[in-house]
Amino acid sequence: MLRPLPLLTTLVLVGPVLFGLIGSILPASGLLMQSAETPFATALSWPGLPRALAISILSGVLSTLGALAVATLILAGWHGTRAFAVLERALSPLLAVPHAAAALGLAFLVSPSGWIFRIPANLLGWDRAPDLLILGDPWGLSLTAGLIAKETPFLLLMMLAAMGQADAGPRMAIARSLGQGRVAAWLKAVFPTIYAQVRLPVLVVLVFGMTNVDVAIILGPSTPTTLAVQVTRWMTDPDLAARAVAAAGGLILFAATLAVLALWWLGERAIGSVGRAWVWSGIGLPDRAARGVGLTLAGGSAAMVLAGLAALAVWSVAARWAFPDMLPEALTWRSWMRFGPDMAQTALTTLGLAVTATAVSLLLVIGCLEAEVRHGLSLGQRALWLLYLPLLVPQVTFLPGLQLLPLTLGIGPSIWLVLAGHIVFVLPYVFLSLQGPFRAWDGRLARVAAGLGTSQNRVLWRLRLPMLVSPVLTAVAVGMAVSIGQYLTTLLLGGGRVTTLVTEAVALSSGGDRRAIGVWGLGQAVAALLPFALALGVPAIVFRNRRGLRHV
Amino acid sequence: MSDGLRFDDVAISRDERLLLAVDARIPPGEVLTLMGPSGSGKSTLLSLVMGDLPAAFRATGRVVLNGTDLTGLDVAARHVGILYQDPLLFPHLDVATNLAFGLPRGGRRADRRATVDAALADIGLAGFGARDPATLSGGQAARVALMRTLLSRPAALLLDEPFSKLDTGLRDQMRELVFGRARVARVPVLMVTHDEADAQAAGGQVIRLD
Amino acid sequence: MRFALTLLAALALPTLSPAQTQPDPADWPAVTAQADGQTVYWHAWGGSTATNDFIGWVADRAGEMGVDLRHVKLTDTADAVGVVVNELQAGVTEGGSVDMIWINGANFASMKRENLLFGPFAEQLPNWRYVDVDGKGVLTDFTVPTEGFESPWAMAQLVFVHDSARVETPPTSAAKLLEWAQANPGRFTYPQPPDFLGTTFLKQMLIELTDDPARLSEPVGDDYDDVTFILWDYLDQLQPLLWRQGRAYPESGPRQFQLINDGEVDIAISFSPGEATTAIGNFELPESVRTYVLDGGTIGNASFVAIPVNANAKAGAMVVADILLSPEAQARAQDPAVLGYGTVLDMAKLSPEDRAVFDALDLGIATLTPTQLGTALPEPHPTWATRLADDWVARYGVAD
């Protein structure tokens, strides 16, 4: 019964991507749609293309380097300290905060009329905000900064998970006893192993940075936009020919992504030899400065995201609130009464989708892992790449095709299509969160149980899963957060009819009603946080008398 | 000047409970062995000398290395080398680069290369520089780990159950090599072990905990 | 495994309901009977919370008639047109996903030209008898005859919104606006074309500047460069004086209001005469905000709803279109406390009770009276909007 699951899972991961790519390649090359004659030529002749592509690449590469640097510095300089414990506690909430909500909060914080600038405005008596191009700057620097703030927690979590395999403690002791400062020791002795473990997540961040739509709409430039946003615009153009152009644009972006990934790979090798030369040189780092920079950047970006959320919360209960007041003139529940009921209803749809997508993913993942245990059916070393495939191929490249192909089969946009789309993106994250703990579970317990005459199914349901309840719940929380954050998937596969908290929040961002954005953004953040709170809370209650199982 | 490693009324306690108390001096080139079952807190003394004693422990007294009080000094500035039961070679670096890791700064690149090559020849591993540490035998890896520590010219050497994972035959060889090298380099050695044979081979003072 | 199969089966299920008989707009009882129990997906721009609330209210009215109205919130009306085009391309000629679109201008022109619309139906709606057919210009949409393929529901006219606490004498012509911007650099901007409001600003300025506004009612021709030269010359002068030196623009109309509230700009534009009053009531604008129109008048047009040819719930959509034309809904839409849109109805055709409701409306501090608004200028032919927006993007939308 378990045997077909690995194959089915592979199909779920690979099928939609291939399907979608074909669905994009055909119209882009002028097939499938007669009205479009030369989609590639049209896309290539768009005057904004060089700049849009440059911004996409720049913001993707810089945000990845930035997030990697901040996560590395904080881990190298502060792991095991009290400051780190504080940051670590903020990690899950920061991760769960959806990209769109975080970006909307940041947008209010850093704009020239935002909270930060209101401090000097009050002190110096400005009644007009300075005319500074901070948000939507032509080179996408605020977009890059926003992405760094949002991706650092993700990479940090991935690196923390990899720490166990890197023998970090003893290695640090050796390296430091050999005369290296804390940060230099970590970089030379621990980082290479950690990086090898988190390489794919780093590439996911890189691809996301280059091709995301929701953050780029909110924080990115508009004259022109990033290529991913432009592709989305073409996708929704009334002129049918523009769809083929969108497919072509998506493929151009895909090609650029592949090129950047290749360059990244070369960069990794270059950094590798630079690193070896550095080890040979015996030169260290200014430890105090490096630690200071790490803590400032990590703490600063965490504080910015949280302060942005706080700003959203204040806006959601604000009566009149004009520049340069630090706080609204009065507080009112009116915005919650106005938008709350609608939001609550949408939240139900959102959670319903998230629960279903996660449940299906969880069944497939546990089935696969159990098949591995019982029949030795593993997907092999390449499985990791398979898992990452949907995350490494840009969404704007294959989602348009995925929307187009079912349509040719007579399947219109629907909630089922959205659900299927969510599973494609939820499954890898659930698999990645669960595979480590599942495989690490002490198999001798199963042998002991089998010796007592327990069936394999019973071992799974009565021993393995109950003991793994904490990682399973964490995987569920991660899966739900991923589903709740799916913007483009929901927008394109739902044809606009399936509204979730994120599609509403991004749609509202163009209108700029901060009170509505506050209500919706907070609703989205809470929806994503709730599962994490449960994942932490439930095992603590269930296992309150079982010290050996309280590893959270 | 080099009067070795001195413990002046050192006491380590946890939750108001005294774990161990040491008042001793290890002259250069000699070995002090700390014996006791696991859980007796003997490794915390190593942590104290290294400078990474966990916050849950409290230490009083002074650790003085060649006349310098180590209290409050950064780990990297103490020049204290350590060997564990695992060689803990960095798996991402080749054997030569592992050795170069501990070389103090300065000197031309060619000189540093020559130093590492000489060190490899010294432990009978000439030509092993480009090897992946994972391909070394247990004895070879242990020798590389020792040499890596010695190349960093430590002022003191700590041994944390250093020979317990080696085959019996190799154990004697390694003991001889480690203690011999320490003697030649006039480095004070603090060893933590529960193997009586280690203490006998070291031949110095022995403190027993229980 | 079984679950996965169920899912696969569910995915393969046709989501399109079986073909229904086409409703006949002339047989209204049959229409309402068919509409009962239908779900209508109304694709309408969702960027304004006031509009969303109003549509929510319409949904309650529709519910009373057994129609389940769902608002599909768009960031751009073109999205909905795209869905219809896409579906028809894929052979979905029945049971499509878009039942009704808030539409006008270029989107209507292209849908009508491509035969993507159901109808004619508008003039058969029961409440059509109240519509001000002659005075409000609802029989043409951007010069394109509507011919019953779309039903009007609100009047819009371009107004300028200013913060009277910061601007004492607002500029009332293109020339004065440039002068004002020179004196107050960085304090004015407009939504980024192809946003419809931004594009309307371009058209308005072209009407202001050109010698021959009548030329604009004909489609764009070979003389495009000659006609628009003066506009680009003007915008080239204006651009460096804009907010952020014209290197960034607000995405939409309501976003400009936020900029006024944030003290970033002093003048904004709006296509809804009552919008500023509504926004003040919702705390979105300071109480010192007022509206005005240009000396030479401003562009006005009507908002319509249209039904795609492959709509699934055509009868339900017609019922909603009729509700939108009801005096109750029209009065509510005109109330600045709700929406502040102009009505498409003729007061003379209403019953005295209904008229009294309109008369009793408090238009609010920032809303101009019909007299102050003056006669709306006609929209240019839709080809102008498309061409101007494309050109604007090429000139200013893709920084070098």
Image (cartoon, coloured by chain):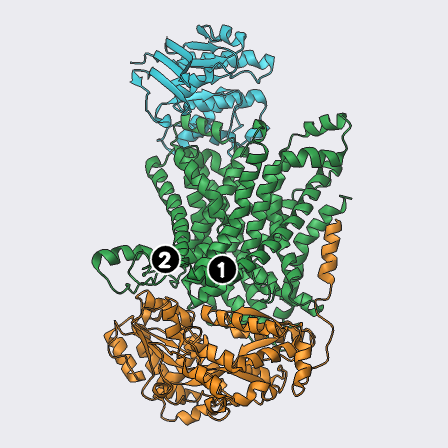
Chain colours: A green, B cyan, C orange
Could you say where residue B117 lies in the image, as x and y percent from the top left? Answer: 47, 26
Q: Chain of mark 2?
A: A
* Contact between labelled residues 2 and 1, with CB atoms less than 8 Å apart: no
Residue count near mark 2 (Cα–Cα under 10 Å), binned few <14, some 14–19, many ≥20: some
- The amino acid on which the numbered mark 1 sits, given as a three-letter code, is Gly
Residue A456 falls in image quadrant: top right
Determine the residue positioned at 41% across, 87% down.
C225
Earlier-in-chain disc, 1 versus 2: 2
Q: How many marks?
A: 2
Of residue C261 and residue C380, the one placed in the foreground of this image is C261
Work out whether residue A510 can be spotted.
yes
Q: CA distance from mark 1 to mark 2?
A: 16 Å
Where is mark 2, residue-wise?
A331
Residue C7 falls in image quadrant: bottom right
Classify residue C328 as left or right of residue B14.
right
Of residue C145 and residue B121, the one placed in the foreground of this image is C145
Discs 1 and 2 lie in a common subunit: yes
Numbered tag placed on residue A340 in the rendering: 1
Determine the residue positioned at 38% across, 79% down.
C363
Single out the residue that lies furthest toward the left: A124
Assign a secondary structure to mark 1: helix
Classify residue A519 as left or right of residue B23.
right
Assign a secondary structure to mark 2: loop
Q: Chain of mark 1?
A: A
